[in-house]
Amino acid sequence: MNAEEWSGMDNKELEAEIHPLKREDGNAPDNPENCTEKEGACRNGTRLSQLSRWRTAAFFLSLFLCLIVVFAFSFIIPCPVRPVSQRTWDRKYSSAVTYKFLAVEDVNEDKVQDVIFVFKDTNGSSAFNGSCSDEGLSAPCAFVAAVSGTNGSTLWERPATEDLLWMECAIEKLDGAESPGCLVIGNPELLTAIDPRSGKVRWRQFNNFGANYTVVTPLLKMPDVDGDGFQDLMIFATAGDETQSVLYSGKSGNQLGTGGRLSLGARPGYVMHVTKTGAYYVLFYSADSLYGYPVKDLYSMATGTESRLAGLRHDPQWEKKIQSPTRHIPLRSSGDVRYLVKVPGRAGENLLVVKSDVAELLDGQTLDSLWTVNASHVLSEPVFGYYTPDAPHVVLESGLGPHRKKVMIIEGGSGAVRWEQELNSGAGSPGPATLHTADHRSMFLFWGEHPAEANDTGSPASPQNLYLFHPSYPNALLELRNSSERIVAFDAVLFERSRHACYVLLTGPQSSEGPGWVSVAKRKLKEDVSGSRVIWLSQETGHSEQSIKDRIFRMRFSSQL
């Protein structure tokens, strides 16, 4: 390459650096001089440029509006105020007595459960300026009260009856209302439906049981038998060996029919069971016998007419098992029947018959015996929990002798005893309770005194300790607290959905005793876990006391499994 060629190349490279966008034809793309030749192309370029600017402006305007909306919801519009729940509270009433009734539901609709209970006094508490005479009742009388689950403050109180025979809440569409209601059965003969949201009376009716009759509890919630669109109620009362059945309208409280008569023996108990074919049956137990009556027949006895409801019918399979005309159901085991409860199962509910020396599970459809477990002198009504994930288990407390008991966790499907522990137990010790955890198992809570911790063999005056057991640590108990007070009612509850696990204690003298201090208290479970003490049931390897407490403290809860 000669010198002239090198010189030409240098000039071109220099020109390219000076005019980098110049095309090979020597014309710059945006040179105004070229617009006279390509005016159309220039106008198109200008329109595209303007369109691009409009698009950019629209994008930033949309972004600006979105940011305004986000900031408005974040800072300008206030979020709902979450109620701040106290970890523990204690509400006391002086010169009063109480009853073995405790209900938990959201009374003031703040998404936190509240506590409903009954105490007997001449006047209400200092937070309620009311007296028995306000409702035309002689003093002292029974007050129904609701206290806030967040801080224990009084939500409402109402004089309801002179003496409480039975009370039950969570009755659907009572008085035709959308929210559930509470029904008070009082003495003298009075039925009172109360709105738990306000404490107002929905309806009040006189009952027709007659003298010397004792009310059989709980209430029997019937399907809608009078055709008004609301479920109805049947109440049983006994005098000697005779049981009277009286049917009431859930909407108005009016009695339906004249009532019926059954011969079941002294002081029977019962449960209502729905078979797989959809037939409603009431199972009565008295002494050593079990009886089965279809609700269809009970309705006919009480009203003297036949029901036309499709659900009120006979189950052919059950009718083959029930002996006529006595309506007796034969059982494999013998002994006095103490409890009859329904047990959840994979294929539907089964029936657990707890007798004086044995517990027997019956198939909910065939009434055949599935298993039996030795359980003498059962002290309290069985409760249910999950020792293994998603497998229902039965918790039984069996008496072993003076001031001694054994807590058993029994697998519902097979009857195998998965865990048991002996404890000292005073008279009137509360029954057990369970709380479901997020790992599809349960925490088990029960009262007593571990023998290794006792100074003697136990006595009725010994303090009662509350223990927590979780299947993750089968050889350890957490001692949460002790109480020397007379515990009338006890329950473990999630005060907020899937959180805020607590237990509630109702203590004080009962209605048959002289007046004294009545107390209703809530304690947050995790607070007691932090200050608890681990009791080893056997030699432990691999876990420290603090690691167990920390693990249980961090456990999450489930409202239902």
Image (cartoon, grey):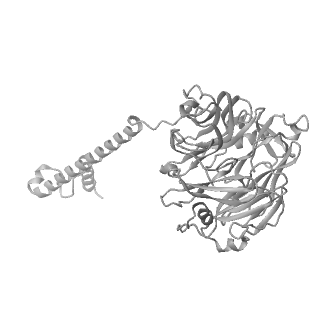
Between 246 and 529, the residue placed more toward the observer is 246
Question: Residue 47: image x %, image y %?
Answer: 17, 53
Residue 116 appears in which quarter of the rendering?
top right
Could you say where residue 363 lies in the image, as x and y percent from the top left?
72, 67
Looking at this view, is 69 or 13 the one in front? 69
On screen, residue 51 versus residue 471, left or right, reads left
Report x, y in % for residue 84. 55, 33
**Looking at the image, can residue 79 be seen?**
yes
What is the residue that sits farthest to the right in this orientation? 456
Residue plotted at (83% across, 55% down)? 356
Tally of marks = 0
**505 vs 557, nearest the viewer:** 505
Residue nearest the observer in this picture, 324 or 292:
324
Could you tell me which residue is drawn at 27 percent across and 51 percent down? 13
Question: Relative to 269, is 280 on the left or the right?
Answer: left
Q: Is residue 539 above or below residue 162?
A: below
Residue 547, horizontal then vertical, whole percent: 75, 41
Depicted 229 relative to depicted 147: above or below: below
State which quadrant residue 119 falls in. top right
Q: Quadrant of the C terminus?
A: bottom right
* Residue reaching furthest to the front: 211
Q: Quadrant of residue 452?
A: top right
Tell me, yes or no, if residue 109 can be seen here.
no
